[in-house]
Amino acid sequence: MIEVKNLKKRYGNFEALKGISFSVEKGEIVGFLGPNGAGKTTTMQIITGFISPSAGEVVIDGKKVDGFDIKFKKKIGYLPENNPIYNDLSVYDYLSFFANLKNLKNKKDEIRRVINLTKIEDVINKKIDTLSKGYKQRVGLAQAILGNPEILILDEPTTGLDPNQIIEIRNLIKELGKKKTVILSTHIMQEVEQTCERVIIINKGNIVADDRLDNLKGKNERIIIEVDKNLPETFFEKFGEVTRLSETKFLIKSNEDVRKEISKLCFENGVMIYELKTEFDDLETTFRKLTSVEV
């Protein structure tokens, strides 16, 4: 379990994090979203012990994060956005190097396990600088899951992958997430919708949303109705804010599903309904509303 408590980070006069708090349980895959400069990378670097906070703390399994503690390092697998890979090493030597850093037992077996999981068997003897961006990303992911860490922090894990590879990595993350704590940061909303059940959105150093994906997508319900008569907008006003789309078509903004009540009202007044449906904001729309930027 990860607990982030009132986390603050300053760089001179710039406050990158303004006292954020959240927790992630074992078995959860949480999407961590925000525009560029919102504080995502800073948060992940503090959680992984790469940098220290100006105030607040991160607690993992009841213990405060200590980036110098090798036992702590073993608990976390981290894939940074700009994956720092040693280009002059072969893939196998690179993974062997990190296996030694993590002081892993059964090093060869563990390297073989992550190679198979990330499907990089074909390039294990190639120099990293000869690989495509997609293969480099998979090598970085192999490094992150090396040693079977309890926590995975993944920053843009599908960058550079082709559609088939994206599906493979997405399925791998979902499988890993059944037994691990996973924080997934990405700009690709579809990745979050396909992989996560909960989403945290950060903007300008503050948490602006922390909710289940279904709840975030289900906010701002809109009801579209088309009838056989030219009705006044006031006919539907008790259900919410009404906008006329045409002579016989209306949009009703409501906080709940009132289609049954609308149907009853129309029936009682002899109004025939041609169309009655609901629409919800998708994650991208919610994100844009909360961060006031284009995705």
Image (cartoon, grey):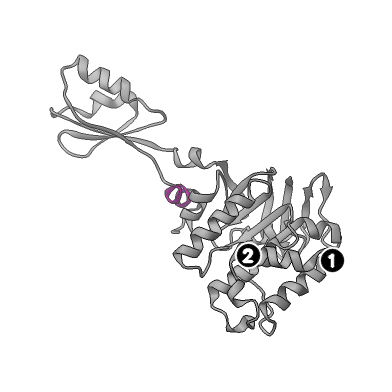
Please tell me which residue is depicted at 14% across the width and 35% down the height of the picture. Answer: 247
According to the image, label 2 marks what residue? 116
* Amino acid on which the number 2 mark rests in the picture: Asn
Give the magenta part as a residue range: 283-289
Q: Quadrant of residue 153?
A: bottom right
Q: Main secondary structure of the magenta part?
A: helix
Q: Where 173 falls versus 162 (above or below)?
A: above
Pointer 2 local density, CA inside 10 Å: few below 14, some 14–19, many at least 20? few
Residue 128 image label: none
> Horizontally, is 155 left or right of 67 in the view?
left
According to the image, label 1 marks what residue? 103
* Amino acid on which the number 1 mark rests in the picture: Asn
Q: Where 249 falls versus 9 (above or below)?
A: above
**Tag 2 secondary structure:** helix
Q: Earlier in the sequence, mark 1 or mark 2?
A: 1
Please tell me which residue is depicted at 72% across the width and 72% down the height of the picture. Answer: 95
- Whether residue 288 appears in this view of the structure is yes
